[in-house]
Amino acid sequence: MNAMIKKCGLRAIINTDVRKKFREKQPPTFLHPAKVEPVKDFHQSLPGYKPTPLVSLANLSRELGVGNIYVKDESDRFGLNAFKVLGSSYAMGKFIGQRLGLADGELTFDYLCSGEVRKRLGGITFATATDGNHGRGVAWTAQQLGQEAVVYLPKGVARRRVEAIEETGAKAVVTDVNYDDTVRLVVKAAEDKGWQLIQDTAYEGYERIPRWIMQGYTTMAAEIEEQLEDNALPRPSHVFLQAGVGSFASTLLGYFVNKDKEDYPFTVIMEPEKAACIFASAQAGEGEPQRVTGDLATIMAGLSCGEPSPIAWPILRSFADGYVVCPDYVAARGIRILANPLGDDGKVVAGESGSVGIGLLSLLSLEKECAELKGKLGLNEDANILIINTEGATDPVNYRRILWDGRYPLP
């Protein structure tokens, strides 16, 4: 049974039956921690690999009246300003490994970059559609492998995101349509021109590579587990996960469900106001995923997607506890909070798609109108909340306008 709440400019659905029905659902086996052990081994073979920080915000936790706030900060993953390269690099590695008949244990990045592999493979052009971060990961990985990349981007993309892709030597193609239609364009172009598609959303007949991309994201979850244990931190009772097509959110949720069974963290899925396809799907019930249309305009460019991935939606439908639609001012508030830490809390540089979790938590905790929703989500002094900063300031112009000029204020 779903409960709908509209407060503080937010729309929320609480899935009140999800825990009761847990035993009726099958956790996604391809995201089981044992299944994805080779993934982190592969990432550790990449040049410049190091775990990204898990920042504990003790002063902000006290200010918001919760137990602990942990921010997994992906703003400097491989120097690419976002987590997405974890998925693209692993999927491209697996693709090459399977073409060469390599076992997972033989899948090291040094070997894939070798002249021997390039000679055996010949030239490959990898192609994808992106709002910025995934495409940069594909382009960077192709550059490391000595291969080519073509990256399609939707209308309205920030110039800096295009430049970051072009700096790898990839070709960037900016379309005049939204993200979902841009995906359709690159799929057609790849079929026509013999390019290898590396897309982070699935469709009928194209599921293997999106699953590999999702497995790539599990390195982040494995790092979080190690960091909590190494620092003797209480395990998260809640996790706030932002969603575009849902691949990232469903990966972390699926990983925690497999690891913790019914004791997995209370999980809240967040989306932009004009691109809330997961919310629309939850609102429609337990059927097929729903599509939202239009220009999908939002400052959270990495979440500007109108069609859920058919691999991601069943995981979110089965195990997510809540879904919240967030106007752009929620993300802008999160940027300002993370850039201006309380006391000796660490500063986090978060882009618009990475900051929405902190922005939402602050509104739920401090705005009296949100008290009912805060209670429904179980946010109290015993709550230990995990939030993922999925990107740094990938649009530095807008980042500065939000900080300096106060763009997107609370209404």
Image (cartoon, helix red, strand yellow):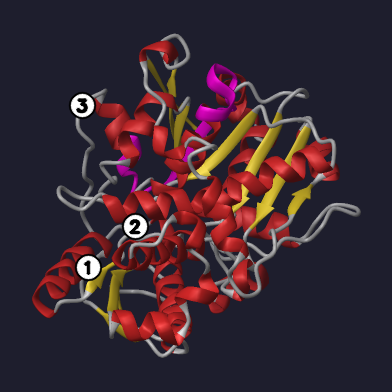
* Residue tagged 3: 287
Indicate the quadrant where residue 68 lies.
Answer: top right
Residue 359 can be seen, yes or no: no
Amino acid type assigned to the residue bearing label 3 in the image: Gly
Give neighbour class at mark 2: few <14, some 14-19, many 20+ (Cα, 10 Å).
Answer: many
User: Where is residue 79 drawn, in percent x and y?
Assistant: 62, 75
Q: Nearer the viewer, residue 311 or 122?
A: 122
User: Where is residue 111 drawn, in percent x and y?
Assistant: 50, 75
Amino acid type assigned to the residue bearing label 1 in the image: Thr
User: Where is residue 172 drawn, in percent x and y?
Assistant: 32, 84
- In the picture as drawn, the residue positioned furthest to the right comes out as 344
Say whether disc 1 or disc 2 marks the residue closer to the N-terminus: 1
Indicate the quadrant where residue 91 lies.
Answer: bottom left
- In the picture as drawn, the residue positioned furthest to the left comes out as 192
Is residue 394 found left or right of 179 in the rendered image?
right
Instruction: Point out the image quarter for the N terminus.
Output: top left
* Vertical placement of residue 12 versus 339, above or below: above
